[in-house]
Image: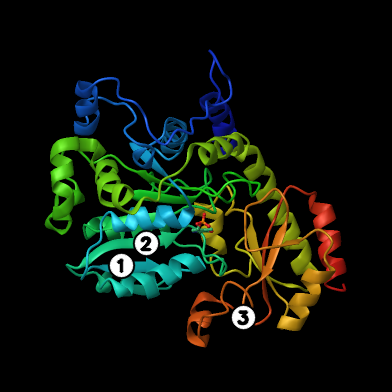
Amino acid sequence: MMNRFEEFTTRIVQQVGKKEGPVSPVMVNSASFGYGNSETGEGIFDGSIKKPLYARMGNPTSAQLEQILASIDNGVGAIAASTGMGAVAMATLSLLKAGDEIISVGGLFGGTYSYFSETLVRFGITTHFFDVEEFNAIERAINTATKIIFLESVGNPNMRLPDIRRIAEIANRNGVAFIVDNTITPLSVAPIAMGADMVVYSTTKIISGNASALGGAVIMRAISEGEDKFKGERYNDVHPFIKKMGTMALIANAKKRALRDFGMSANGFGSYITMLGLETLPLRMDRIVATVEKVVKALSENGLQINHPSLTNHPQHERYRTQFANGCGTLFTIDMGSKEKAFEFLNRSKLVTITANIGDSRTLGLHMASTIYRDFDEQTKEFLGITPGLIRISIGLESAEAIIDDFLNAANI
Ligand SMILES: *Cc1c(COP(=O)(O)O)cnc(C)c1O
């Protein structure tokens, strides 16, 4: 079988560039678009004419990015967003109303955790949180109010790996929408092929790859011509879109229910920069996942407490080998035992850039408990795996040997 990154590198460079006219994507920054005549204006608004309406509803540069991302993930379409949180909000708000429930499986990005546990609660939406191995409890928690099962392909920062196929099977058997945040494993994990309905990305991370643009995207699968769970009673609000737009209904639904009214829209410049990054994504992923395996092996052999599923002591090591054959992205964690030791390590390292980002060309690091998770109570920190000495590392493009030397030196080994 061809390595996934090898397969994508040819396709993506061809999709970003053009054979005629400007080779680099054309950047359109206009907020509005002239319709020429009123008849065309009417056609654009009723959907019969496919031309830009107003940049909050779509932009030609973002449309190219959307097309490429949809093709990577076997989606029927995609909607670019201003940020990853914008994408999470768009995907979820397109389906939710007061009284609904979400089932969230596994570790969660801090922003998504607060969105579920603090913000959506204010609007009458409840989220139930489960560990990746609690299959029976997840299934038992499903009731008529459950609208979404949500998970991240890799728990950030707890590094737990979900059984995506098995959760998809539970969601599909019970007629519940399944959304996967694939920010950490683009190309290497294919959620729609594994049974997901929507894939969410923060393109700010490894897709752009160099901290140059905030962005996000939601990729949606096609609604089936025959039976489809979105045709069930649970998703009554989506039915008018299925009637009008058929296979494209999830896109049309999210555009009207979320993008139009909340305005988490991408901008042309951000989408342009994102495509420049996307072009080299397969090469960077391929190199970084290989570096991560070398680095975690060397560090753990030198006695550091490393959490990464490629290590045989990790509880999901077997799943890593079978379902994550192309790695699980750029992250791992080091538990230094105390906040003081963690600060000392980060301050002594010459390579680490101390920042809250991940998926950069450079190696990044951050002490978790004093930063992203500082406002969380002890019980929540325990659930999310945030110990006092925990450092999250995101490996970059530096040589594995240089990183290992630097880390051992920083840890006084
Ligand atoms: C960073 C991140 C987000 C949020 O993305 P922003 O672009 O910062 O809004 C969501 N999910 C995951 C897994 C992330 O790492």
Residue where numbered disc 2 is placed: 150
Q: Disc 3, ligand 1: is the CB inside 8 Å?
A: no
Q: Residues within 10 Å of mark 3 (few under 14, many from 20)?
A: some
Upstream in sequence: badge 1 or badge 3: 1
Which mark, by number, is residue 387?
3
Residue where numbered disc 1 is placed: 102
Residue 154 pos. (x, y %)? 52, 60
Residue 136 pos. (x, y %)? 31, 72
Residue 392 pos. (x, y %)? 65, 67
Identify the element where label 1 is drawn.
strand
Type of the residue with mark 2: Phe
Which mark, by number, is residue 195?
none
Front-lying residue, 412 or 366: 366
Q: CA distance from mark 2 to mark 3?
A: 24 Å
In the displayed structure, does residue 168 sit left or right of residue 286?
Answer: left
Type of the residue with mark 1: Ile
Q: CA distance from mark 2 to mark 1?
A: 7 Å
Q: In the image, what residue occupies the spot 59% across and 33% down?
A: 279
Type of the residue with mark 3: Thr
Q: On screen, 412 above or below 90?
A: below
Upstream in sequence: badge 2 or badge 3: 2
Q: Residues within 10 Å of mark 1 (few under 14, many from 20)?
A: many
In the displayed structure, does residue 326 sit left or right of residue 338?
Answer: left
